């Protein structure tokens, strides 16, 4: 999704800003742009498409500047085009970049047209430049103009702005869209993502909603929503270059798939001991609180929601708790009834997903016992706004398609199921069994990665199809859904998932030689029923690719049977997910898609 970077320095900032834009490419975008203060004028360059095209323009024009703002845009209002790319300007004097959505943009646009402003783009963002210009023409400083503009703006925004009359300061503002200040030596930065400026500094200040800041090369001042100057905590984060570079891998997604054994170790390490999960790993007082929980509500989006669906089954089987699960984007609109002693759980890799944050903020008004987040980014809004948190410790996930984040979310959610059961003194033997199985999980994931060769051989017969069906039963149905999401996301093949027993109620009509069927057949009490469902597919000419327990000896004819390593039943969903990730990756590779930045998608979806 959109990315902001801004810099005030004693050295030239053009290169630094473009470098920062490159670092944010993983978030997904369709155009990029930059505005650089050059004392008498502002160099304004924009390009549709990759940041590299903007960089080519920079190389050609060589603008020199010590103050600038830059942006990658993910279109919401107005098509992807150079004219809609940020920065937007007002009368060649005020330049802004904006992330988020201005909900009342139609009214504001009309009123600004009434003041004589002309709009050159179709965006909701351009009006911010005009609004600032309007208030500065009334004699206000940029800082004061930002406060006056904020009074009118409805919606989510992170804004950075510069003014032709000031070659020293830039002004930023945050409301429900991430924004931070980076503290350098003789230079300061602002960005929507710490990765954008991690090469320049490790010291960050995460702004809060309502904050406005004025930044120059050697100083910064932060003001809260009531315009009172405030001090915000400086957070030191080391983001190693290794974590944000592909190394020898072809794509970040590939790297992140093969990093999973280590990532899962990092999720589990220091959180289990002996035959059980350790106390209070979700935060001080969490174990006591868990003893009171009678119901669970999960809200999340996309892959994180699939992790929640698996966990709902664990909460029921291991902690004997009923669990309701909702798409975060839908939760608020179904008028949810909240029973006493309910715990709300949010799951999010980025911790910045607007739908999930909005669901949490809605839930806080209800009578939940507490809110708990499973999140990968310690500095995220979700982490800060939840009562309890467990970080998945997966390291930065750059590929838009979530892989290691999902696997580690599942490991973290299993820790939660065990913690809830422990606090209620339930199923001690089962807890011991699963705890021991968790220790072996990284090794079993490594084993499942060895199936790559067999999967590479399957990939061509899926890469040449337009559709695919994924089947799983019970706790494997969400894994089938995740497999289908991964395939459509990066290969653009239409894929759907069904619980295998549902096939005969409709989708069986789709089966022919052009509909590959990918099925998950672990050892379970319904394994035989699943095999019967797969026979129904075979009988109708469908090609089956079955990931199965070694005990499954089915003749798949034209397709392929891949035997999976054995592990404890409760952890098998985690292991069976791995070959589906590899399959999607290999299929996308054959189709030549932009695997790390699939079309139309964004890594961190910061708009509702
Ligand atoms: C996963 O492959 C997707 N890119 C997407 O579904 C993602 O999981 C979803 O947008 C939620 O993101 P979050 O975990 O950062 O909240």
Image: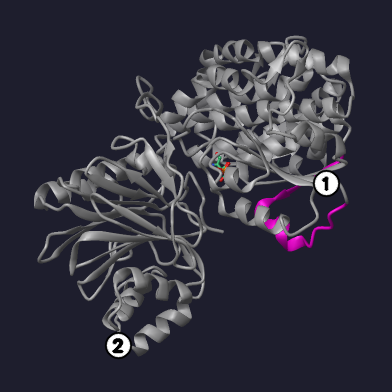
Mark 2: secondary structure: loop
Magenta stretch bounds: 322-339
Residue drawn at (32%, 37%) of the image:
201
From the viewer's side, name the closer residue of 11 and 46: 11
Query: Is 448 in the magenta?
Result: no
Picture layout, residue 514 above or below residue 53: above
Residue drawn at (44%, 80%) of the image:
108
From the viewer's side, name the closer residue of 101 and 5: 5
Residue drawn at (59%, 21%) of the image:
264
Asked where in the image residue 598 lies, by quadrant, the reply is top left
Whether disc 2's CB lies below 8 Å from ligand 1 is answered no
Query: Is residue 542 shown left or right of residue 232?
Result: right
- Name the mark on residue 342: 1
Label 1, residues with CA under 10 Å away: few <14, some 14-19, many ≥20:
many
From the viewer's side, name the closer residue of 96 and 364: 364
Query: Is residue 191 shown left or right of residue 469?
Result: left
Displayed-image quarter of ligand 1: top right
Query: Is 328 in the magenta?
Result: yes
Question: Is residue 88 shown to the viewer in this render?
Answer: yes
In the rendered image, residue 545, in percent from the top left (x then y), is placed at 65, 23
- Cα–Cα gap, marks 2 and 1: 54 Å
């Amino acid at each position: 999704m959109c990315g902001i970077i801004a810099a005030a320095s004693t050295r030239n900032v053009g290169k630094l800003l473009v470098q920062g834009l490159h670092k944010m490419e993983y978030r997904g975008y369709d155009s990029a742009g930059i505005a650089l203060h050059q004392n008498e004028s502002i160099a304004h360059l924009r390009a549709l498409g990759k940041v590299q095209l903007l960089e080519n323009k920079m190389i050609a024009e060589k603008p020199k500047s010590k103050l600038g703002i830059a942006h990658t845009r993910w279109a919401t209002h107005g098509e992807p085009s150079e004219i809609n790319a940020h920065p937007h300007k007002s009368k060649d004097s005020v330049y802004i970049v904006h992330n988020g959505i201005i909900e009342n943009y139609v009214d504001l646009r009309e009123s600004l047209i009434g003041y004589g402003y002309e709009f050159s783009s179709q965006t909701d963002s351009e009006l911010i430049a005009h609004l600032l210009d309007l208030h500065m023409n009334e004699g206000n400083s940029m800082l004061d103009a930002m406060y006056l503009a904020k009074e009118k703006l409805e919606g989510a925004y992170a804004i950075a702005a510069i003014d032709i009359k000031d070659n020293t300061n830039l002004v930023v503002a945050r409301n429900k869209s991430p924004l931070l200040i980076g503290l350098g030596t003789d230079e300061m930065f602002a960005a929507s993502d710490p990765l954008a400026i991690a090469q320049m500094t490790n010291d960050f200040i995460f702004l809060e909603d309502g904050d406005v800041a004025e930044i120059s090369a050697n100083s910064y001042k932060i003001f809260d929503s009531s315009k009172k100057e405030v001090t915000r905590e400086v957070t030191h984060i080391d983001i190693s270059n290794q974590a944000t570079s592909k190394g020898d891998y072809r794509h970040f997604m590939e790297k992140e798939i093969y990093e999973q054994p280590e990532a899962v170790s990092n999720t589990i390490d220091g959180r289990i001991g002996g035959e059980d999960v350790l106390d209070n790993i979700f935060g001080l007082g969490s174990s006591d609180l868990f003893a009171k929980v009678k119901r669970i509500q999960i809200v999340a989006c996309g892959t994180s929601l699939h992790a929640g669906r698996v966990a709902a089954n664990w909460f029921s089987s291991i902690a004997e708790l009923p669990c309701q699960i909702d798409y975060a984007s839908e939760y608020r609109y179904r008028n949810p009834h909240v029973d006493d002693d309910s715990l709300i759980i949010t799951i999010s890799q980025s911790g910045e997903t607007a739908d999930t944050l909005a669901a949490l903020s809605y839930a806080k008004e209800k009578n939940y016992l507490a809110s708990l987040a499973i999140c990968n980014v310690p500095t995220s809004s979700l982490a800060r706004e939840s009562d309890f948190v467990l970080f998945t410790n997966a390291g930065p996930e750059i590929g838009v398609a979530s892989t290691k984040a999902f696997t580690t979310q599942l490991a973290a959610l299993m820790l939660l199921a065990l913690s809830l059961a422990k606090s209620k003194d339930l199923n001690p033997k089962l807890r011991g069994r699963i705890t021991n199985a968790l220790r072996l999980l990284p090794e079993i994931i490594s084993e499942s990665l060895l199936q790559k060769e067999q999967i590479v051989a399957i990939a061509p017969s899926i890469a040449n199809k337009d559709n695919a069906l994924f089947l799983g039963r019970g706790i494997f149905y969400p894994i089938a859904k995740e497999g289908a999401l991964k395939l459509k996301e990066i290969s653009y093949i239409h894929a759907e998932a069904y619980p295998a027993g549902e096939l005969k109620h409709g989708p069986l009509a789709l089966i022919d030689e052009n509909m590959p069927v990918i099925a998950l057949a672990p050892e379970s009490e319904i394994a035989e029923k699943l095999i019967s469902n797969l026979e129904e597919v075979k009988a109708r000419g469908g090609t089956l690719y079955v990931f199965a327990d070694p005990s499954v000896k089915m003749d798949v004819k034209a397709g392929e049977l891949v035997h999976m390593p054995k592990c404890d039943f409760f952890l098998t969903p985690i292991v069976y997910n791995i070959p589906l990730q590899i399959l999607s990756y290999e299929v996308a590779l054959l189709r030549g898609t932009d695997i790390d930045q699939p079309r139309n998608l964004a890594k961190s979806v910061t708009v509702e």
